[in-house]
Amino acid sequence: MCSMKNILVSIVLINILQLETYLCANLNSKIIMEDAQEKYKFLITAGYRPKIDNLAKYVVSLRGKKYRRVFGDDHYCGGSIISPKVILTAAHCVCRGDNRIELRPFRPSDILAVAGTPRRLVVTEKTQALKVDKVICHAYFDPKTFHNDIALLLLIKNIYEDGVSAQRISLQTSSLPPHTKCTVLGWGRIFEYGPKPDLILHTNVYIMPNEFCKERDDDFFFGMMCATDEDDFEKDSCFGDSGGPLICNGSVAGIVSFGNGCGVPDEAGYYTNVSSYRDWIRKNGLDKLRPVNFILLIVLQICITES
Ligand SMILES: *[C@@H]1O[C@H](CO)[C@@H](O)[C@H](O)[C@H]1NC(C)=O
Ligand SMILES: *[C@@H]1O[C@H](CO)[C@@H](O)[C@H](O)[C@H]1NC(C)=O
């Protein structure tokens, strides 16, 4: 007979495992407390900081394995949490090679994903520094044209999701009409060649019709989209925002991919269209790793076999 106790015990175990993940993520990361607030208080041009930031919890900062002088000074790209073990990012952030044949992922041990805080340079009690187990590059990513600029990071340990500082975001599945208002956020440069902020910045842009994108980029291709604000072209993503999310209607619809400079008049920012890669994401990331469900399934299996 299947006992309720078995199921309860397994749920408790799962929670302990997740808590352990969280605590270890905090303890293992050899990071120093450094309040760099004074040094890095930047003003911004076309970005803003909402009073209550409901979106930063979805974003991670990608870094090297060791910062240079200050925690977070090696931030180079963003990413989105799409499951406790999977980060969605741009291929050009984590995959290199001059052409498709030479394309190879970065070594997982060279990447650190930092979740849980809107501050880039400060370690808070919510900071989670996560090691990467596997880098999955889209097999047809082309570094010259940025076609298929999408990749996944599979983490060694689960992100601890508290719903406030770290949380997974759903994938946009419906087709968004042109002029849909979206938000892009990250720690990228606040103007071209400018500095990177400590506190994450947001800006609102609108999805542009494909014709608009095509006219401005000869390589515009399936799986890309572009976004800007025609009333204020300065609103844009910039270097260091790559890999981070374009969030529309509460889901991640785009991945920051490239642009012709940052905030250039009559130009747009280009994004990987998440909707176009739904199946690729599921097949290569989301469907592969379901440890929590596995434990529950095993317990249920035992219960069913026993009864
Ligand atoms: C926006 O999200 C709501 C609720 O999640 C959904 O009902 C609606 O269809 C979405 N709109 C678009 C354009 O995707
Ligand atoms: C994104 O891709 C989906 C699925 O291929 C498509 O329906 C949608 O129109 C695309 N979005 C844009 C803005 O091109």
Image (cartoon, grey):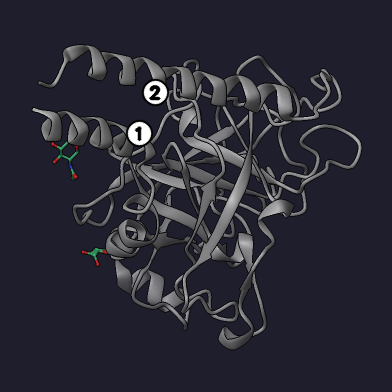
Rendering coords of residue 44 (x, y %) = 66, 34
Residue 160's x, y, as percent?
A: 49, 25
Q: Quadrant of residue 155?
A: top right
Task: Tell me the SS state at disc 1.
Answer: helix
Quadrant of the rendering where the C terminus is positioned: top left
Specify the quarter for ligand 2.
bottom left
- Whether residue 133 is situated above or below residue 247 in the rendered picture: below
* Proximity of marks 2 and 1: CB atoms separated by less than 8 Å: yes
Give the percent coordinates (x, y) of residue 253: 34, 51
Q: In the drawing, does residue 213 fall left or right of residue 53?
A: left
- The residue drawn where x is 38% and y is 78% is 221
Q: Residues within 10 Å of mark 1 (few under 14, many from 20)?
A: some
- Label 2 sits on what residue type? Ile
Residue that appears at 42% across and 29% down? 167
Q: Please give the name of the residue rendered at 46% of the width and 79% of the height, measured from the top-left corner.
A: 140
Q: Which residue is mark 2?
A: 14
Identify the disc placed on residue 292.
1
Q: Residues within 10 Å of mark 2 (few under 14, many from 20)?
A: some
Give, as a three-letter code, the residue at label 1.
Answer: Val
Is residue 189 shown above or below 38? below
N-terminal of the pair, mark 2 or mark 1, is: 2
Res. 269 in view? yes
